[in-house]
Image (spheres, rainbow, N blue to C red):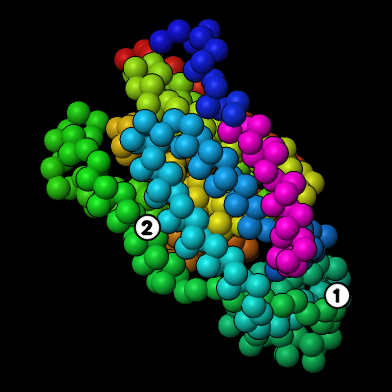
Amino acid sequence: MNFLNPYIFIPLIIAFVAVVFFTPFVRKTLISANITDNPIVSEHSHKQGTPTMGGLAIILGLVLIACIYSQNQILLITTGVMIAAAIIGLFDDLLGLKTKEIQKVAKNVTSQVVELGRLKLQPGEEARVATPKAKEDVDKLIKQEKIEIIRELPIKSEISEREKILSQIFVSLFLVVSGAVPFVLSDFNMGLLSIPIAIIGVVGAINAVNLIDGMDGLASGVMGIASLFCAIFSLLTSRFDIAIAFMALAGVCFGFLVYNRMPASIFMGDTGAFALGGFYASASILGDLIVFAVIVIAVPIISVVISLLHRSHVIKLPVEPLHHTLNYKGLSEGKIVALYWVTTLVICIIALYFYKLF
């Protein structure tokens, strides 16, 4: 495949321009409807009022590409799965507009480290009283004059983890019933095992993208880089139909990044994170590049694994997920995002190099 052929990059360019065009309209509409973010992380309180559910612009961009390349069956199927995933994410975003509870924010007013729940607050440090253990500790610490309650934060409502996983499995069934899931994956005849692999792939990708969507430009940048390299990989393996899908995905990610980069003027929300994850997984499975696609999103996958270990009490994080822990430890948001982007880019280059080598 000749990479100098400009036609190869047309889906990326169209998708990029489309999302750059659609996002201001979506943003204005969301602000008018008062669909804005209310961060629960104290360090992100300055982001309050930023419109969320910006993933609607991403969806519009990908639907436009699907209409232009309507003869591309794989693109149509991946777009269908993406829409199903986005709808589930949209419900979660809408539910998040409702307040579940009010949590207190405590501040260490001593000159010593104070333990609040699973956190160790440095002098002058603030933290939400979120966990059951922290809620047990707070009254005692107030009486001991070790902490003060400085403000309260509304906590969003959300569906339970079990309901969220079940809804994501439901999304994966859209891919399964298409009948397009190949029985041969990575040169192995998987037979009917390809069906649970597809389900796990969709659920895993949605959660991976959703988990890293917690800082300006983090998810859109990582997924844009990974998608671009998946497109290049598809071209190297002469799968132009798959390359179109990944070029489009890279284009919408980079187009959204224009407004989502730090300081973000709009967030993708679960609507966008679910859409990106569903599209990415579906294209990877239908294009039979699962191994490469998994490797290039190693950063979000590692983040998921670390969160699972934390929730299983195998390891202990001061805050979850990993990028918030890094922020808690003193690394700035800009540096964390840059670290995730650069690490993803390096992994992509190495993965492509070894593919060409072997």
Q: Nearer the viewer, mark 2 or mark 1?
A: 2
Q: Residue at x 50, y 22 (%)?
A: 349
Label 1 neighbour load within 10 Å: few <14, some 14-19, many 20+: some
In the image, is residue 22 part of the stretch drawn in magenta?
yes
Q: Name the amino acid type tagged 2.
A: Val
Question: Where residue 209 sits: x, y (%)?
Answer: 52, 49
- The mark that comes first in sequence, 2 or 1, is 1
Q: Which residue is mark 1?
A: 110
Q: Is residue 172 visible in this depiction of the protein?
A: yes
Q: Name the amino acid type tagged 1.
A: Thr
In whole angstroms, how far apart are the C-alphas of marks 2 and 1? 50 Å
Q: Quadrant of residue 37?
A: bottom right
Q: Is residue 199 above or below residue 290?
A: below
Helix, strand or loop at mark 1: loop
Question: Where residue 214 sits: x, y (%)?
Answer: 64, 54
Question: Where residue 228 sits: x, y (%)?
Answer: 52, 28
Q: Is residue 131 left or right of residue 1?
A: right
Tally of marks: 2
Q: Residue at x 57, y 40 (%)?
A: 61
Which residues, given as a range, are shown in magenta? 15-38
Q: Is residue 337 visible in this depiction of the protein?
A: no
Residue 171 image label: 2
